[in-house]
Image: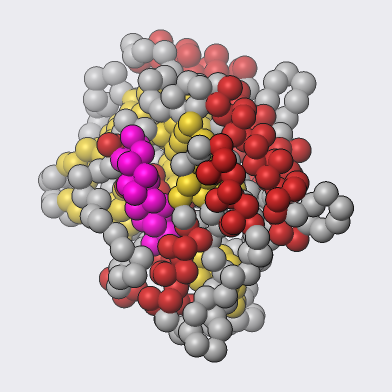
Amino acid sequence: MKRNILLALGLLAATGVGAQTFRFDFTNSKKPRENFIKVAAADNYTAERGYGYDLQPAPAAESTAPFFFSVDVPDGNYLITAVVGNRRAAGETTLRGESRRLFYENVSTKKGELKTCTFVVNKRNTRISETENVRIKPRERRKLNWDDKLTLEINGTAPQLAYLTIERVEDRPTVFLCGNSTVVDQDNEPWGSWGQMIPRFFDDRIAFANYAESGERTDTFIKAGRLKKLLTQMKAGDWIFIEFGHNDQKLKGAGKGAFYSYMTSLKVFVDEARARGAHPVLVTPTCRRSFDEAGHIRNTHEDYPEAMRWMAAREDIPLIELNGMTRTLYEALGVEASKRAFVHYPAGTYPGQTKALEDNTHFNPYGAYQIAKCVIEGMKRLDLPLVQYLRADYEAYDPAHPDAIDSFRWNDSPFTEIEKPDGN
């Protein structure tokens, strides 16, 4: 990593730009834009180069295939300025970052038109200190969230990228997300979570850092060093959203349970954040898709949502009632239509899928998108200062009247996984 940083600094000096700033020119012009690095089709990512097309080859001329571009950078928040469009053809571009976090969707450009998209990406690796690392799971070793690269995915029906600037920023508040598979950045289709959709609705004055992971409980999140790593990045004025419960309820035995070990662990998150001048927010767990005969959602979380509510009241912590809002959402969709918000797909929908996928806990992109809006409405009800950073195109949302399923447009990433995420 040190070698890569030195290479990057040498590259920056050569282009005459400030420290930890990269500027790339992807256009067909023979001469690069001033102070920009010209990117050729052959510039695939290597550790020696420190940047380049990644995960799959560079797109061919006039290609409509999605592509990835990575740059080695230290941990931190980075302001991305992506100029999309092409002087030769019309385009439609979707921008994601790291493990499939959504930032811009379906940006249309006419032939010859360029549009500028700005957003902030939080980048991290597993290192806590010189002697300690986050103990990630084997399946996480492939996740783009946990490496030394900042990776962008340029997708869409006709993805186009003309110029790209990546600039380190220190003055943005960061919203740290802690939770399980309902929050985590899911790398592969057809899975999704609200944590990877929510950045799309906020502007470039704020960053989201999603530390959630499938299968985690409050206590295992702490034991794995995830909270400890997060705290090394936290500063006064930051926020931490905490949603657990799905997996905690499976922990049985003396001293366990909603009003015992669960609350003790939640208190650790709250106390550590407050000690650093950050603001904790509790989020009650999303409901599972479990309907009774009358078409109402069953409570499958036992006392865990109530325990979180009790702690919020006792400790004077803002609480987003996501449990209640998701119940409303699923019931509004109905017993059958609600399947289309979850990973329910017939056999053969995805490569290697020999059996139907019927998951009533984990969302697909449409479901994750709806739940991200629920979280935002929870912020608005609490009048959290974060709502000042909402983009102008965000429209008020009511989970009792969800977006029409058939109107939702999602461009699949190239990578799929039929293995169910950890947890239930």
**Foreground residue among 358 and 390:** 390
Image point 62% across, 17% down: which residue? 2
Residue 196: percent from the left, percent from the top?
46, 50
Q: Which residues are magenta?
A: 370-387
**Foreground residue among 261 and 235:** 261
Residue 244, placed above or below residue 54: below
Does residue 127 appear left or right of residue 150 in this picture?
Answer: right
Does residue 65 appear left or right of residue 292 in this picture?
Answer: left
Q: How many marks?
A: 0
Residue 142, placed above or below residue 182: above
Image point 42% across, 69% down: which residue? 328
**Foreground residue among 5 and 204:** 204
Residue 29 falls in image quadrant: top left
Q: Residue furthest bottom?
A: 293
Residue 314: percent from the left, percent from the top?
57, 40
The quarter of the picture where the C terminus appears is bottom right
The reply to whether residue 28 is visible in this rendering is no
State whether the magenta stretch is mostly helix, strand or loop: helix
Residue 232: percent from the left, percent from the top?
60, 23
Per the image, is 384 magenta?
A: yes
